[in-house]
Image (cartoon, helix red, strand yellow):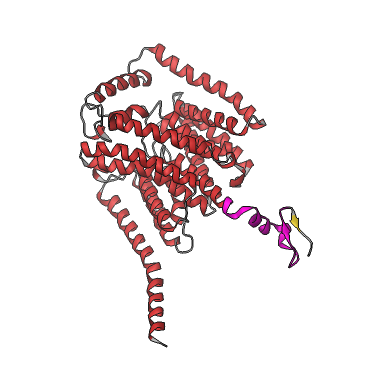
Amino acid sequence: MTTSARTRAVRARLGEWWAGAWRWALMAAGAGLGVFLLLDRGISNGVVTAAVIGLLVIGVVLTGSAPMAIPLLSMPALFVVERVGFGAGDLTASDVALAAAFGTAVLLGKRPLSEPMKQLLWFNLAYQFATLFTVIVNPNIANTVEWFHAWLLISGALVVGWALGRAGLAKAALGLIVGTGCVLAVGTIATGLYQFAHLNFAAVYPVWPWSMHKNFAGTAMAFSAAIAYLRPEWAGLSDVWMKRALWLLGIAIVLTQSRQALIGLMVVVVIAVARRGVTGRSRLTLLWIIPAIWLVVSMVIDQINSQNQHNSVFQRLDWLREVYAFWKHSPLFGHGLRFWYYNPDVPYQPPQAELEVLASAGLVGLAGFVVMWIGILVVLWRVDPRYGTLALALPLSRLVQGQFDLFWTAVQTSIPFVIAGICLGALALSQERGPTTALAASPALSSAPRGARVTATGPGSRR
């Protein structure tokens, strides 16, 4: 064996060793992180968080045979809102799962990105640049961490979804999201039945599989319900199971009495009608919108008529006035992202998207926020409706929900963009395969005689 051949053989062995070593290093780091969090940080509901970390460790082990194992296994973990508490970061288990999935998608995801995907990332980058000024003007750890966190919730989520869709895992990923929503629905219904048995007919705050606020549970389940309702044909989701899931999720959402979730689902139906036209399914669902609107309006009217200054309507009005007055002290660049963590004047997150951005990043940040959302909606509207309807409906429903409640939160912001990324990745995969590849893979053509010419309508005759 020559010297050059030996060198190549050594390099090949080193390459093989490194291909496995980095995965073992990640697995060890994940296990060490899990022990550190559970033993030294005093996490609430550590069992749930341990399960999330366990899924990520399993994903590291499977990465060799399935490169997208971590992003795929992170889909259920994206719903976990339990805190893992990195000091000023105060991240959730969902953030940890999304970060791990993003790292894997960047390293092992397929390239190049499609043009719509690039445009979405650029619009998000424009917003990040606009909020960079408040990070500079208000230097502190929470502000800096949140700048990266906000970028992860949109661009990171898009990249994770893209990698799954582009790898042909759209069906599995969307199925896991719907399945996780159904688990939350079972917990919500069980909590509701126990509550009703004690003659308590108030809004249901689920306590299983972990304690959740009604608005969080409602909006999280609404994302799953949107997939079950739209169930695009290219995803290959079972119509029978999606219909059953939709009923289960719908009942659970009504039990939470989450107005934001109901409004978000109305947006999904309107987008479906606008993009697909009026079909048999949409006619039936349009009838459902009428009682949903009545329920939302009646709940608001009841709270106003009660004149209870501590209910959600009057409390939100007070908060909006306080945040607006607070913003005027720093109108151009705001008081910093997550200012409520360290500013005693307003110790709560503003319950409205644009006002939160205005108080956090000022007029400059708000301009970036508006530009980002206009760009995102225009790009997704132009996508092929077969893929773009679901991709557009979820982010738009999240934006509308954010007009009445918290916006920059884990889970509620990341999941819609993961789903949008899945749709864009699946579209890119279908465009890459093209009609010729799809025909060649079809059973009707697999038995075509060797040498036969294949056209767009089937096998042709010999020349």
Question: Can the viewer see residue 214?
Answer: no
Q: 247 and 1: which one is in front?
A: 1
Q: Residue at x 41, y 59 (%)?
A: 60
Q: Residue furthest front?
A: 463
Q: Where 314 sits versus 423, above or below?
A: above
Q: Residue at x 47, y 54 (%)?
A: 112
Q: Quadrant of residue 233?
A: top right
In screen coordinates, is 123 left or right of 180?
left
On whether residue 244 falls in the magenta region, the answer is no
Q: Where 13 sits versus 241, above or below?
A: below
Measuring from the top left, give residue 3's x and y in whole percent: 38, 85
On whether residue 446 falls in the magenta region, the answer is yes
Highlighted range, magenta: 430-456
Q: Quadrant of the C terminus?
A: bottom right
Q: Residue at x 76, y 66 (%)?
A: 449
Q: Residue at x 42, y 34 (%)?
A: 373
Q: 170 and 7: which one is in front?
A: 7
| Count of numbered circles on the image | 0
Measuring from the top left, give residue 344's x and y in whole percent: 20, 29
Q: Quadrant of the N terminus?
A: bottom left
Question: Can the viewer see residue 70?
Answer: yes
